[in-house]
Image (spheres, rainbow, N blue to C red):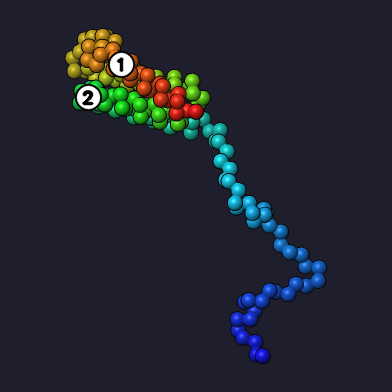
Amino acid sequence: MPASRYDDLVTTPTRQPGEQRPRLDHPPSDRYQPRAAPAPSDDRTGRIVGPLAVVLGGAIGFVLLGGLMAVTSGLLVLAAVQGWLLGRLVSPPWRAGLVGLAAVTIGLLGIWLFGRIEGGVLDPLTYLAEVHGWALIGFVLLAGGGLAAAASR
């Protein structure tokens, strides 16, 4: 039978005596194993930049919602989202809760500073209690700190 031009593609190559099979780095069955999570980076700037961006973005959002647009119910939603994001970026839970409380406090102080620019003369606590009420301030602080701690687990 004549050899076709495809015979060398489908037949196994012949091995020379003493020739060894190539060694693999890992067995083929390893592709079915769950992938290991990448090792966490020990870069301090990477651990600080993300939460800092969330804190600054949240403070700007607080000033826009609470100061410029005078939307009080949106502050609770913004505090919850900000707390959840901080909880995903910061661990352990107690540290995430403290960062969440600090972020919401910075946002509330930003609202007070905006009121000062408009001609307000009250101190921060009196101003925020008059404009937003104690209940909203408490809920906003609980939402920011509580969700940050809960999401950090």
Q: Quadrant of residue 147?
A: top left
Side (left or right) of 98 relative to 39: left
Residue 57 visible here: yes
Q: x, y percentage for residue 71?
A: 22, 24
Task: Say few, some or many: other residues with alpha carbon within 10 Å of mark 1 (under 14 / 14 to 19 / 20 or more).
Answer: many
Q: Earlier in the sequence, mark 1 or mark 2?
A: 2
Q: Which residue is mark 2?
A: 71
Q: x, y percentage for residue 140?
A: 33, 20
**Residue 137, label in figure:** 1
**Badge 1 element:** helix
Nearer to us in this view, 23 or 80: 80
**Residue 26, label in figure:** none
Rendered residue at 67%/53% (across/down): 26
Side (left or right) of 74 relative to 102: left
Residue type marked 2: Val
Nearer to us in this view, 52 or 134: 134
Q: Quadrant of residue 124?
A: top left
Rendered residue at 73%/64% (across/down): 21
For the N terminus, which image quadrant?
A: bottom right
Side (left or right) of 80 relative to 23: left
Rendered residue at 53%/33% (across/down): 43
Whether residue 121 is situated above or below residue 40 in the rendered picture = above
Residue type marked 1: Ile
